[in-house]
């Protein structure tokens, strides 16, 4: 079942000097003046999702594959994890064959059947799946970003996580449960 997180994931472990809610609001307000107000928050959230996910063999660099037009992915370039590993972005087609080498799959605007085909192909292969434009969760991605005025949250599909072959830090699971 998909559950709604009620606070910003990127601020989960107090990585900002300000309280999480204040930091999130500030970043969205400041970004609004320079274009896409969600792009910086999406960048931090995706970086955090990768940071708190464990692969059986940590990828280096982490290959972030984007499929479909993504409205808020402009800040997904040049990301680094706390251990120094880079997150390298590349665009792929909506074909399951294009998933080769992907560690993270970021789904943009795709027809539900194409998005579901990609997440089905990623199942059990150690690919973290994140959907940007899937408010109903039809793609069956592990994480679904939820855009609200002035806020970015996420939903977690615990079934998709359990079938992924990845381990997501229990703190993320608690956060998605409203804890």
Image (spheres, rainbow, N blue to C red):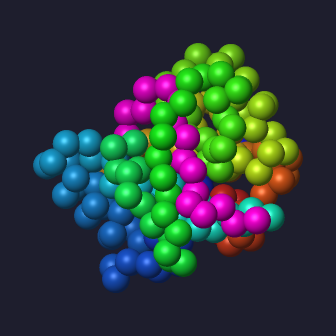
Quick one: quadrant of the N terminus? top right
Q: Residue furthest bottom?
A: 17
Question: Which is more toward the observer, 102 or 37?
Answer: 102
The percent position of residue 16, horizontal first and vertical second, equals 38, 78
Residue 24: quadrant of the picture: bottom left
The residue under the point 19% across, 58% down is 30
**127 left or right of 132?**
right
Is residue 7 something that shows in the picture?
A: no
Magenta-drawn segment: 57-72
- Examine the residues drawn in magenta and state their main secondary structure: loop
**At which x and y percent is residue 87?**
50, 58
Taking the magenta stretch, the answer to whether it contains residue 17 is: no
Q: Nearer the viewer, residue 90 or 71?
A: 90
Decide: is 117 above or below 13: above
Q: Position of residue 77 (x, y in %)?
A: 38, 51
The residue at the far left in this view is 33
Residue 33 position, x and y percent, is 13, 49
Displayed quadrant of residue 175? bottom right
Q: Inspect the magenta stretch and tell me whether residue 62 lies in it.
A: yes
For the point 58% across and 57% down, the residue is 62
111 relative position to 152: left or right: right
Above or below for 146 versus 17 = above
């Amino acid at each position: 079942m998909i559950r709604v997180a009620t606070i910003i994931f990127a601020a989960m472990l107090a990585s900002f000097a300000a309280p999480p809610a204040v930091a999130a609001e500030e970043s969205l307000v400041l970004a609004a003046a320079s274009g896409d107000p969600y792009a910086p928050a999406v960048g931090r959230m995706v970086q955090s999702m990768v940071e708190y996910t464990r692969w059986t063999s940590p990828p280096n660099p982490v290959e972030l594959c984007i499929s479909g037009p993504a409205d808020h992915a402009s800040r997904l370039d040049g990301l680094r994890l706390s251990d120094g590993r880079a997150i390298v972005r590349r665009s792929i087609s909506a074909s399951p064959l294009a998933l080769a080498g992907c560690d993270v799959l970021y789904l943009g605007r795709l027809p539900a059947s194409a998005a579901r085909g990609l997440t089905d192909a990623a199942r059990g292969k150690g690919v973290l799946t994140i959907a940007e434009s899937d408010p109903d969760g039809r793609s069956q991605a592990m994480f679904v970003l939820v855009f609200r005025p002035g806020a970015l949250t996420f939903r977690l599909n615990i079934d998709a996580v359990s079938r992924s072959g990845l381990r997501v830090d229990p703190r993320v699971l608690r956060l998605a449960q409203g804890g």
